[in-house]
């Protein structure tokens, strides 16, 4: 496709403000050319099957033992710390169960997100924006004008912390559950940063004291059924610009992580949350933990796929705070692999 065609199509799509859901609802049987992925990407969608034993680790946080400071639970906690450290080093991804967040909160968050994307177009379009520094926006494809091909997905984005939005500024259909879910994410995030600090051999408060748990951005991702799922992606391969990311997937799979040259499915596990290490934690851990590439294949089912992503990150907001490899982790044998960056510099690179 000519690049001018591509940008004309992208502009018309953008100006329609109806997102990919609008295209899917119009009943098209072929996806527009601007969504067709490059042949090399498409080949990569049919990779050789990975060996059976390669599975993203699932870690049981066993409520009480990880959350309490009880002495007799310290052995269980130590084992959890080891498993988390191992997963963060080798995979950059793991799932957690028994994390303490009630199932009904997870379900209501998925339903709320779906409700946002499935409400009347007018109710949604008033939030439509390509200014991703805004506190709240609904849009399709952050990189609409720059990517090789667009992806089959719409997004509701919101900065939730440290300055939470006002309930009255949030969409009615999902505002309350977003506020509640964000509090739950803060609590779980703090527990995870404690465990990750210990896994790095640091005191449990180290990462929290560096403000890793302070900023939160939430994405309500919506992947409508795609008429030609073999020709595009739901979300192209990327790493996350965050310290960590907590992902809630609905019932429909599609998330894959790149591990040992294989694309490995991360199947939805009822009640579980997926945790992944982002670029910022890879940087401050001096590559001890890895920010793994991942992607979402286009949704070939007849139901929409919904996921809720909570990034511990300032994302596109300007922030002068400086981060570099943690000094306590460095030695003659392990010199710093990165220089110090401000978060603003980092987000410009990411952009
Ligand atoms: O929807 C998903 O399962 C993954 C989303 C994701 O990777 C992201 O938003 O960065
Ligand atoms: Fe991601």
Image: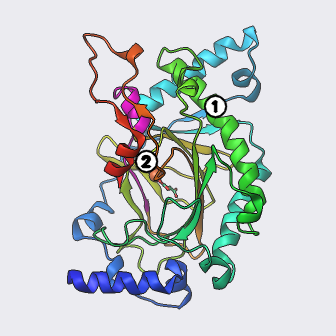
Secondary element at tag 2: loop
Q: Measured from the top left, where is residue 60 in percent x and y?
A: 64, 31
- Residue under the point 32% across and 62% down: 46
Residue 281 among those drawn in magenta: yes
Q: Measured from the top left, where is residue 175 in percent x and y?
A: 74, 61
Q: From mark 2 to mark 1, how far is it between C-alphas?
A: 19 Å
Confirm whether residue 52 shows in the render: yes
- Indicate yes or no: mark 1 CB to ligand 2 under 8 Å: no
Quarter containing the N terminus: bottom left
Q: Which residues are magenta?
A: 280-296
Confirm whether residue 90 shows in the render: no
- Indicate yes or no: mark 2 CB to ligand 2 under 8 Å: yes
Task: Give whichever of 282, 313 is nearer the camera.
Answer: 313
- Residue under the point 23% across and 84% down: 4
Residue 64 among those drawn in magenta: no
- Residue under the point 73% across and 57% down: 166
Q: Measured from the top left, where is residue 285 in percent x and y?
A: 40, 26
Quarter containing the C terminus: bottom left
Q: Residue furthest front?
A: 320
User: Vertically, is 158 above or below 322?
Assistant: below
**Residue corresponding to mark 2:** 240
State the mark number for residue 190.
1
């Amino acid at each position: 496709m000519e690049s001018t065609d591509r940008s004309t199509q992208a502009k018309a799509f953008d100006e329609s403000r109806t997102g990919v859901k609008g295209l899917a609802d119009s009943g098209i049987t072929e996806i527009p050319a601007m969504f067709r992925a490059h042949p090399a990407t498409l080949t990569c969608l049919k990779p050789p099957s990975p060996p059976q034993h390669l599975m993203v680790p699932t870690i049981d946080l066993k409520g009480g033992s990880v959350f309490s400071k009880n002495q007799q639970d310290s052995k269980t906690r130590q084992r959890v710390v080891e498993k988390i450290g191992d997963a963060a080093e080798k995979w950059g991804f793991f799932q957690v169960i028994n994390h303490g967040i009630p199932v009904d909160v997870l379900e209501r968050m998925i339903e709320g997100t779906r409700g946002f994307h499935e409400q009347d177009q007018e109710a949604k379009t008033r939030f439509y924006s390509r200014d991703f520094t805004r506190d709240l926006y609904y849009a399709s494809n952050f990189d609409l004008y720059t990517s090789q091909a667009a992806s089959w997905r719409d997004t509701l984005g919101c900065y939730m912390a440290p300055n939470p939005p006002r309930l009255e500024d949030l969409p009615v259909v999902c505002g309350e559950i977003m506020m509640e879910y964000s509090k739950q994410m803060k609590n779980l995030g703090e527990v995870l940063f404690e465990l990750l600090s210990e896994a790095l051999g640091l005191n449990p408060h180290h990462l929290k004291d560096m403000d890793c748990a302070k900023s939160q951005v939430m994405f309500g991702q919506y992947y409508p059924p795609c008429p030609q799922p073999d020709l595009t992606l739901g979300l192209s391969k990327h790493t996350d610009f965050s310290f960590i990311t907590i992902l809630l997937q609905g019932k429909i799979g599609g998330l894959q992580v790149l591990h040992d040259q294989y694309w490995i499915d991360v199947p939805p596990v009822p009640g579980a949350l997926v945790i992944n290490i982002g670029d910022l934690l890879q940087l401050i851990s001096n590559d001890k933990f890895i920010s793994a590439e991942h992607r979402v294949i286009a949704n070939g089912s007849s139901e929409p796929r919904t996921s809720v992503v909570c990034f511990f990150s300032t994302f596109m907001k300007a922030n002068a705070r400086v981060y570099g490899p943690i000094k306590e982790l460095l030695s003659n044998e392990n010199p710093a692999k990165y220089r110090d960056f401000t978060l603003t510099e980092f987000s410009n690179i990411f952009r």
